[in-house]
Image (cartoon, rainbow, N blue to C red):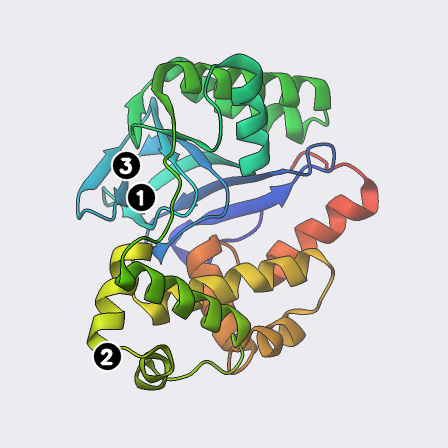
Amino acid sequence: MVAGPESGSGEWARHWQYAELPDLDLLRARYVRHTFPRHSHEGYVFGTITRGVEDVGLPDGTVVHAGPGTVVMINPEVPHTARAGVPEGWVYATLYPSAQVINDIAADTTSLRGTVGFTETSVMDPYAARLIGEVHRAAEEGNALAADTVLRVMVARLLSLHGRALPARVPRSAGARDAARARAVLEGRMAEPPTLEALAAELGTSPFALLRAFKKQYGMPPHTWLTDARVRAARRMLDAGTAPAEAATEVGFTDQPHLNRHFTRIVGVPPGAYRRERARTYKTGRDLPT
């Protein structure tokens, strides 16, 4: 098990990928002091708490208190935070399947079409929670057939109970269009982004109007979104075998310690540990139980 960001507090975490299921990331962890800042994921999140309580903060300001038997479901690009809900923290198992995996299962098992999502962030479903744990166990044992089967059964169950088609996210208002244009600029100049004032001037709007529009469209201000985007880009580079120091420079962090800090806060493990797990998976063609 990989030591967590605060191993002295009894925290531990393992974020890895099973080579036989390349469109799925897995995380098992215990966190006590660690907090996840506002961030989002390109794919879906399915998590279950086995001990303690996790507090998940949502864009509307509500907080979900998730305990044992609960399944947390977060749709792609939904900003959220996470922290311990009790002093002893929380222990959980989480699955991060790609959007393609979930939409393929939906097309095969439901009448939902397009991009699908889930109507609830948190549901009490001990059976689905147990299936999440079984996916982890099967992957750790190298049982690809079981891991894939149980994953699909779990997702199909949650889709049948809580699934819906997500509306197309088309920027209709002038503010939404400015936010989308600002996002494109930040993606293209990730290593050397403009100031908020310069970005607003380039788009023909004011700094505060752009700030309001961006937060409304993406659930976080531009600088927070950019940090999240940099960590995503760094993950892709680490997946490809890039060294953390080189990835830090390429995505626009001042140095590797800055990458380490932001990466650990958002992903839940340091970039070095993340890269080692990837290297082990790709070298062996399958992962081994810990």
Please state if 143 lies on the left or on the right of 93 as rendered.
right
Is residue 100 in view from this perspective?
A: yes
Residue topped by disc 1 = 89
Closer to the camera in the image, 107 or 12: 107
100 over 254 or under it: above or below: above
Which residue in the structure is indicated by mark 3?
53
User: Above or below — where is 203 with respect to 172?
Assistant: below
Work out how far the residue at label 1 is from the one at label 2, CA to CA, in angstroms: 42 Å
Residues at marks 3 and 1 touching, judged by CB atoms closer than 8 Å: no
Q: Amino acid at mark 2?
A: Ser
Point out which mark residue 206 bears.
Answer: 2
Query: Can you name the residue that lies furthest to the right here?
Result: 284
Q: Is residue 232 above or below residue 226?
A: above
Measured as percent of width and height from the top left, residue 7 is found at 46, 56
Residue depicted at x 56% and y 38% = 98
Q: Decide: marks 3, 2 in contact (CB < 8 A)?
A: no
Q: Secondary structure at mark 3?
A: loop
Label 3 and label 2: CA atoms lie apart by 42 Å
On the image, which quarter does residue 117 sit in?
top left
The percent coordinates of residue 22 (x first, y second) are: 69, 38
Q: Position of residue 231 (x, y in %)?
A: 51, 63
Between 106 and 123, the one lying in front of the other is 106
Q: Which of pointers 3 and 2 indicates the residue nearer the eye?
A: 2
Residue displayed at 39% across by 62% down = 180
Q: Amino acid at mark 1?
A: Gly
Where's the C terminus, which quadrant?
A: top right
Q: Where the N terminus falls, by quadrant?
A: top right
Q: Quadrant of residue 178?
A: bottom left
